[in-house]
Image (cartoon, rainbow, N blue to C red):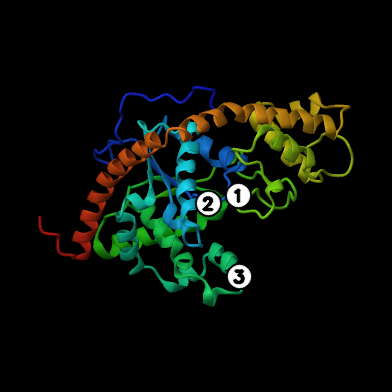
Amino acid sequence: MPEEGALRYTPLAMISQCNPAERRPRVFSGVQPSGALHIGNYLGAIRHWVQMQETHDCLYCVVDLHAITVRQERKALTAATLQLANILLAAGIDPERSILFVQSHVPAHSELAWILNTITYFGELRRMTQFKEKGGGEQESVGVGLFDYPVLMAADILLYGADHVPVGDDQKQHVELTRDIAQRFNREFGKTFVIPEPVIREEGRRIMSLDNPANKMSKSAASPGSYIALLDPPDVIRRKIRRAVTDSGTEIRATPDKPALTNLVAIHSIFSGLSPEAIEERYAGKGYADFKRDLGDLVADALAPFQRKVAELTADPAGTRNILREGACRAEAIAARTMERVRERVGLVPRPV
């Protein structure tokens, strides 16, 4: 996590509007305001988003339209959307170097999704792994939004000419579909969209559940003991790590036959900067209790400055809303140019001015 006070706004640097050949690579990524963001989300995604601000033109989106593919309580969704924006800001997303906005604040996402629906095949969506997993055996009664989710995701990405899309393994298939849709549109209507590339980071991308190391840490998990939420209080963090499952034996070694301990060593390694080998050497002759105690302190201390920053931002909701309003205006300016090209290619009559 960034050091306390590390969130610094630089002089306004608008996202490049120039010829694609002259601009920095552009990145788009979004996250749903549902569930509790956890250390796996930070280690595997958000910290890399922060780093990419140095090399890319970045757009980061709170994808609230994706969240409502499953039922959300109205007030809870509003609160979660603002909280997620504050989490991204506290983690180091700089609204003057990046565009941070809420998906529903830019109506072009929905318009482009409808147009892309007309060239997306039913069979392509039916093959999406996430739909099959979430729909389970009740696909006849699953909402169309869940089925059509990947097309809206394609619209999110293609609206902004994103060159790179940071995603986890579970979303790679959706980016591949986005590429297919973009290429199909370009063939049928003329060159319009940039063909995006998925970016999957190795380090931190597979932080596993604390109560079952066979499963990836998930913000939608039924048991809160399976993950460490970014906003968990220090005593809760220490308790969750103390209760995390371990393997047989007492030796601190990250080996294939010790998946639970290997996961905890990986978390320690990323937060401490020590290699797994150095961690094993440090705890030679010590047991799981010593290791877990120190790991709990390490994670709690690392998250403390970030949590204080979230609290500061939460105390100023008008400030967060202003950032999101400016972000939406900047995003909309890019999206409007894309939609002008799309409408012209498809043959839609321009709106009279």
N-term mark: 3 or 2: 2
Mark 1 sits on what residue?
A: 219
**Is there a contact, CB below 8 Å, between mark 2 and mark 1?**
yes
Secondary structure at badge 3 equals loop
Q: Is residue 23 left or right of residue 235?
A: left
Q: Is residue 103 above or below residue 141?
A: above
- Which mark is drawn over residue 187? none
**Is there a contact, CB below 8 Å, between mark 3 and mark 2?**
no
**C-alpha separation, residue under disc 1 versus residue under disc 3:** 19 Å
Front residue of 71/127: it is 71
The spot of residue 310 in percent (x, y) is: 51, 33
Secondary structure at badge 2 equals loop
The spot of residue 342 in percent (x, y) is: 24, 58
N-term mark: 2 or 1: 2
Mark 3 sits on what residue?
A: 136
Residue furthest out toward the left? 353
Q: What residue lies at 56% left-to-right and 31% top-to-bottom?
A: 307
- Observer-side mark, 3 or 2, equals 2
Q: Is residue 254 left or right of residue 274?
A: right
Q: Is residue 304 left or right of residue 193?
A: right
Q: What residue lies at 25% left-to-right and 63% top-to-bottom?
A: 189
Residue 179 in view of the camera: no
Front residue of 221/49: it is 221
The spot of residue 223 in percent (x, y) is: 69, 52
Q: Classify the position of the C terminus by image quarter.
A: bottom left
**Amino acid type for the residue under numbered disc 1:** Lys
- Which mark is drawn over residue 34? 2
Q: Classify the position of the N terminus by image quarter.
A: top right
Residue 326 in view of the camera: yes
**Amino acid type for the residue under numbered disc 3:** Gly
**C-alpha separation, residue under disc 3 versus residue under disc 2:** 20 Å
